[in-house]
Amino acid sequence: MPKISKHELQLRQAIIDKCRWMNASGLNQGTSGNISVRHDDLMLITPSGIPYETLTPEMIAALQIARDDGAHRGPLKPSSEWRIHLDILRARPEIGAVVHTHSTYATALAMARRGIPACHYMIAAFGGGDVRCADYARFGTKELSNAALAALKDRNGCLLANHGMITIGPTLDKTMWLAVELETLARQYTLSLQIGGPVLLTDEQIEEARAGFASYGLKA
Ligand SMILES: [Zn+2]
């Protein structure tokens, strides 16, 4: 394996730190979540089925973003969900990181194949007035990548039917922040459905919220 640069080593450690954090915070359980980060023409991604506590930077798998065959560098196979990460990084050149989890409330809504409407102004952090639920396709397939990319049009998060959720962003920090916000919105929306359902914000109100985010550096 070629020598890993200091910067790449930091990115690999950041992936591990975020994996451990998302389990400690309750956002994710076991090894069902996975994280990827763009590093030049490479995608760095969590390996398949290894408990996060035992991960070391060398175990993070590296894939060429331009390649489609899953060929990887590293001692362990990449996450079984590498394809959706790779296809998103390829289709969205502005994106630097992808977080995927089976967080409880987002997944509960995804099981019901329900997206999240404009029930709270924080929805604007995802780029518009809703977070869509992508059509169902089996994990690891090109069909799932295509369904997710359609649901992610003009958005930086979506639900995956009968599966979980995904968030995308310029940096890993921002992307993990979005994952926490998406799970929070999913929980709040689910609770509001139990008391008659939310009153939805208008497109104009969502646009106002988006403009407000931009003014304090949270450009959606
Ligand atoms: Zn998954």
Image: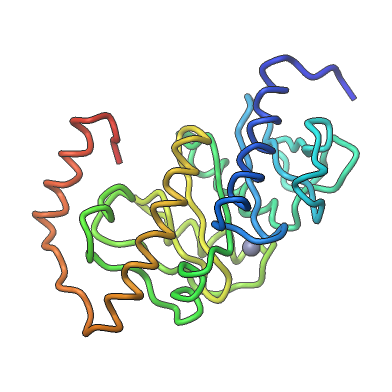
Residue 209 in the image: x percent, y percent? 16, 47
- Where 129 falls versus 106 (above or below)? above
Q: Quadrant for residue 55, please give it.
A: top right
Residue plotted at (69% across, 57% down): 81
Residue 71 in the image: x percent, y percent? 82, 43
Residue plotted at (55% across, 66% down): 164
Residue 66 seen in the current view: no
- In the figure, is residue 89 to the left or right of 200? right
Residue 66 in the image: x percent, y percent? 67, 37
Q: Which image quarter is the N terminus in?
A: top right
Residue plotted at (16% across, 69% down): 200
- In the figure, is residue 19 to the left or right of 173? right
- In the figure, is residue 175 to the left or right of 2? left
Count of all numbered marks drawn on residues in the image: 0
Residue plotted at (30% across, 83% down): 194
Residue 85 in the image: x percent, y percent? 61, 48
- Where 193 falls versus 24 (above or below)? below
Q: Quadrant for residue 19, please give it.
A: top right
- Where 16 falls versus 137 (above or below)? above
Quadrant field for ligand 1: bottom right
Q: Which image quarter is the C terminus in?
A: top left
- In the figure, is residue 20 to the left or right of 53? left
